[in-house]
Image (spheres, rainbow, N blue to C red):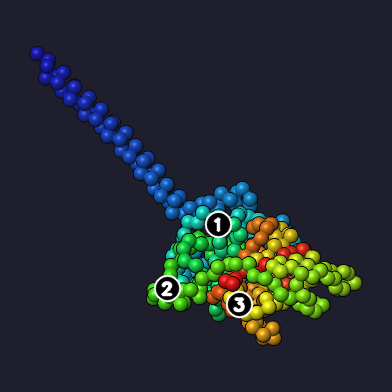
Amino acid sequence: MKFPKYGNSFSTETIAQNAIKECVLAMIAILLLTCFISIMVWVNNLPTTFFSLAQKAYGIGTNSGLTVPKAFLVSGNQRYEMTPFVHFDGKNMNKIIYPSADITPVLTLQEGGEVGTEFSESPVSVKAYIADYEADTPSLHALKELPGNNFEISGVQGLWNIEVHAVFPSHDGLGNSNSSYRYASYELGIDMMPMVFTKNANEIGQNVCANKETGIAKVSGPNGPREHQANFNYQQDDRNKSINVNSNILSIESVKVNSSYIIDLGQEMPICSLSLIFSNGDKVVNHFSIQTSTDGAYFSRPIYYDNTAAVSGEESYDISSHFPVTTRYVKINFEGNTQGDVYAPMQVRVFGNS
């Protein structure tokens, strides 16, 4: 009888087969676990991954060989790398990526809190905003500046982009500074929560902007005041320039740097924002500031803005870091741009609660 022999042979073969199956199952489990971990890492680092893809598609190097300085938003003890989307290298403007209205918040911030900024290079100046790209008209809300390139969080609660605009000294090929400058704008998705204490009804009502278009009574330009609904010319640098004003829109053909325009609303009223259209808004970053006054003589501290260069059309700029503001006069100061010292044609509208 050889049955015991056959029995022993069958048992050994079965054990070997089971071992192979277990090994294959273990390898499959390891592969599945590796894929799962990779997916989780990719999801948790989605902004970084997306920007890496954008880098390959658009590139962040400039024609001069200089790369975009890195920017970080600092909250508490954490640093969050921001995504650059526009960079001016001193000669050419590079659009890296369009800021998305579909926001994935990287951190949660509380209204009234503070954030800081850090850079891989020392900037000349820094400005910060809450940006809304989801609306029909993209808008910027200036954050209150604090010492040390820090900012106070304010604006409307919800999911937003926080933007940082920075100016850096320019360099030649040898690393020496020259008279030009570099400019970069960065963004990061945030979830902004309301203050921990409850506001009373009056305070809530005062902080709501209806954004109704407001009439313009008079405009004072480089050559003095003019009534509304008037077309007039003035002489500047041996060239004729024109300004057209109707009851709601201020149209300016062109203006040189360091020029100011004062809009007289005719009476004091709660004002929310200015809406500007630069004819070269998608190709040039224009620098300007906004001030307000009740008497036309003493103006508030300027709020500094840049158009985002993301769109060619209209953009809205809040008139204060804490809006609305009751005022009669709105002053716009034009302070240069990345193309030169002359602004192209533009239109200005005022929005408020009246």
Mark 1 or mark 3: whose residue is earlier in sequence: 1
Q: Which mark is residue 269?
A: 3
Mark 2 or mark 1: whose residue is earlier in sequence: 1
Q: Is residue 52 left or right of residue 335?
A: left
Please tell me whether mark 3 sits on a helix, a strand or a loop. strand
Instruction: Name the residue at 79% across, 70% down.
Output: 230
State the separation of the CA atoms marked 2 and 1: 24 Å
What amino acid is at disc 1?
A: Glu
Tell me if I can see residue 166 in this picture. no
Query: Where residue 317 sits: x, y (%)?
Result: 62, 68
Q: Is residue 30 left or right of residue 19?
A: right
Query: Where residue 282 sits: x, y (%)?
Result: 69, 57
Up-down relation of residue 96 to residue 199 (above or below): above
Between 174 and 257, the one nearer to me in the picture:
257
Q: Which residue is mark 1?
A: 134
Rendered-image quadrant of the C terminus: bottom right
What amino acid is at disc 2?
A: Met
Tell me if I can see residue 282 in this picture. yes
Q: Is disc 3 in contact with disc 2, using a CB cutoff of under 8 Å?
A: no
Please tell me whether mark 2 sits on a helix, a strand or a loop. loop
Up-down relation of residue 1 to residue 257 (above or below): above
Instruction: Name the residue at 60% across, 77% down.
Output: 269
